[in-house]
Image (cartoon, rainbow, N blue to C red):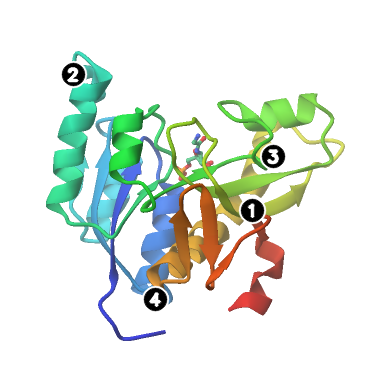
Amino acid sequence: MSTARKCRLVVLISGRGSNLQAILDQAARGELPVDVAAVISNQPGVYGLERARQAGVPALELDHKNFSSRPEFEATLIELIDRQQPDLVILAGFMRVLTAGFTEHYRGRLLNIHPSLLPEFRGLHTHERAIAAGETEHGATIHFVTAELDGGPVIVQARVPVLPDDDPDRLAARVLEQEHRLYPQAIGWFAEGRLRLEGEQVWFDGKPLMKPLRLEDCASLS
Ligand code: GAR
């Protein structure tokens, strides 16, 4: 890993922050060349904020309920984020819909993790819906964020089997374990300058990515 300046990261959360923890842990072990500059939650008092504090990272609350409109909330959020001068902003269980004003401001430097194999199952309750649809495979996706909800260009996916006796919680736990490997992988690529967005096209290692990368193939890419 290069000794160049680390990638400055701001992480947006709304809840328990287990993906945040995976990133903090890898960064602390020197396996991910990032500095987590701040963690911001739109939900006050969530456990993810405590995880940030324990790691010595500024933990900020910005309760969207204190704003009368989405653009007003986002204007303040942008101010808070930009004060940190991040190279990359990541959504890690951030459960607010974002307007085009916000997503365009961070175009090409805003990532999201979504618990399904996009474009399947955008939106909420993905595990329940995958089981109800009789899927035999499910997973998680990292994508660049654009104005279309869960619709931005896909970078990499992790797959898990759906087992015959699965309930949404068991399936969610299996997916989450992969999420904790998936997000650091994608962030690492971005930090190393291997990943970028041009228009709607993801570029990886200097070539346009024609289909999503698969986490299970990633050992051969590093
Ligand atoms: C994760 O499963 C993430 O994929 C999902 O929220 C969970 C957050 O968990 N994100 C979304 O559903 C976004 N649409 P965490 O707070 O423990 O990281």
Seen in the picture, residue 209 relative to 78 is either above or below; the reply is below
Reading the chain from its start, which is encountered first: label 4 or label 1?
4
Q: Name the side, left or right, on which 214 lies relative to 163.
A: left
Image x and y of residue 26, in percent: 42, 69
Disc number at residue 157? 1
Residue at coordinates 24% horizontally, 57% vertically from top-left?
Answer: 86
Spatial distance from mark 3 to mark 1, Cα to Cα?
19 Å
The amino acid on which the numbered mark 1 sits, given as a three-letter code, is Gln
Q: Mark 2 sits on what residue? A: 67
Spatial distance from mark 2 to mark 1, Cα to Cα?
35 Å
Residue at the front extreme? 199
Reading the chain from its start, which is encountered first: label 4 or label 3?
4
Respond yes or no on whether mark 2 lies under 8 Å from ligand 1.
no
Q: Depth check: give the residue in front, 199 or 137.
A: 199
Q: Which image quadrant is residue 130 in?
A: top right
Reading the chain from its start, which is encountered first: label 4 or label 2?
4
Spatial distance from mark 2 to mark 3, Cα to Cα?
36 Å
Q: Do the residues labelled 2 and 1 touch (CB within 8 Å)?
A: no
Q: Mark 4 sits on what residue? A: 29
The amino acid on which the numbered mark 3 sits, given as a three-letter code, is Arg
The amino acid on which the numbered mark 4 sits, given as a three-letter code, is Arg
Q: Which image quadrant is residue 158 in?
A: bottom right
Q: Mark 3 sits on what residue? A: 170
